[in-house]
Image (tube, rainbow, N blue to C red):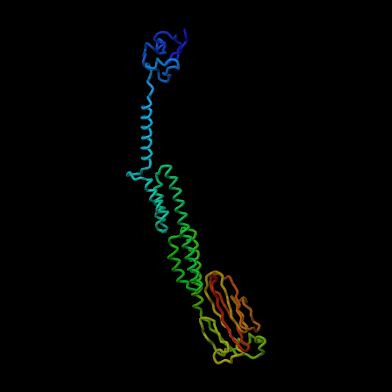
Amino acid sequence: MAIEYCVRCGKRVTSEGEAAKTRLCAWCLAKNPASPVPGKSALPGPADSTTTGALLPRPSAMQWIVIVLVVAAAGAGAFVLARRGPGGADLRARFDAIKADVVADSAFERMAANERAIAELRTGAPADLAIDLDALLLDTRARFEDAAAKACRSAMLDVDGLVAGDSFDDALRRLESVAKPFLSTDGGRRLTVRRDEIKRFSTAAKAIDATSWTVRFWQWTGDASAPPPDWDALTRQAPACTETVTKVAFPWKMGRPGALEPDFFAAETSADIDLPAGEYILTTHSDDGVRVWVDGRLTIDEWEPHPERATTVTLPLTTGKHSFRIAYYEGTAVAVLSFSVQPRH
């Protein structure tokens, strides 16, 4: 007599009679011979295949195929539904359309619109689509930055060309028209800085151009190989003539100011100019001697007799009025005097 265990309750039973067929103890057999206990195996043992009729039947191969197909279809339906937004719009199709537009369109207005569309589609998107949207957003911004940088570099070259010609107003108009779409980019910020610089240049240039210089002239006697012997005594005298100009630029060469003799004459002038803060370039062309003071400080000192030459210095100035004083003398032969002050570009 073999010892068996009830497949329903686990009690030891003797494999005889009906118990041998069902593998149930007498109590379980009397209670419900056809239904196995939940949680207990109802499958027959390897050597007991004749008992399967009393247990739950195994699914056939065809039934397994049907089950797999049903589960797959349900999963696919859930996947499609997860990709659909409000109103049944296909999120993936919208994503593909935006991506195609990003790749094909380099217009700045479209790039900004695509960035907004991506941000809107990103709200509530499923996880896998959200990852793709984040990558597309980074690509869109990179493309925008690259396009903006190229446009800003081109604009900067145009503007620098205008500034070099002192067309400050034209340069400002160019910057205002170009910089607006790119203010959030590095290139746009550089354009904005450049715009502020040009405004300063423009303000300084207009102040300099509006300056009036009253030049006083004297005749002197002495040695052509040396400066006038007593400049202070000379300039305390009444001038032989005066001339008011907006630019100190006298290319006399072999000529002369007014009715003075063409040799041995001297000149002095001064002016106050209201300037914005920045660096300024002071330049003189002279033959013979010249000196320039800025706010009482000697800045250019080319006082010994010399042939025509240019002298340039760069000077930082604060915001406000600054006094400029120029002294010049001519010995013999060629006579030249010019002075300019310009903001450093």
In the image, is 100 to the left or to the right of 234?
left
Drawn side of residue 116 relative to residue 87, left or right: right
The one of 103 and 10 positioned closer to us in this rendering:
103
Q: In this view, does 101 lie above or below 190?
A: above
> For residue 303, which quarter of the picture?
bottom right
Residue that lies at the very extreme toward the left in this rendered image: 87
Give the image location of residue 150, x and y in percent: 48, 61
Count of marks placed on residues: 0
Which of these two is toward me, 133 or 294? 133
Query: Residue 30: x percent and y percent?
Result: 37, 11
Left-right relation of 69 to 225 = left
Look at the picture and state if 244 lies above or below 99: below
- Residue 65 drawn at (x, y percent): 37, 29
Locate residue 313: give its quadrant: bottom right
Residue appearing at x 46%, y 55% in the figure: 143
Residue 247, how many percent across, how many down?
52, 81
Picture residue at 43% right of the left edge, 45% below the top? 130
Residue 255: image quadrant is: bottom right
Q: Up-down: is 343 above or below 130?
A: below
Q: Which of 187 and 5 is in front in this view?
A: 5
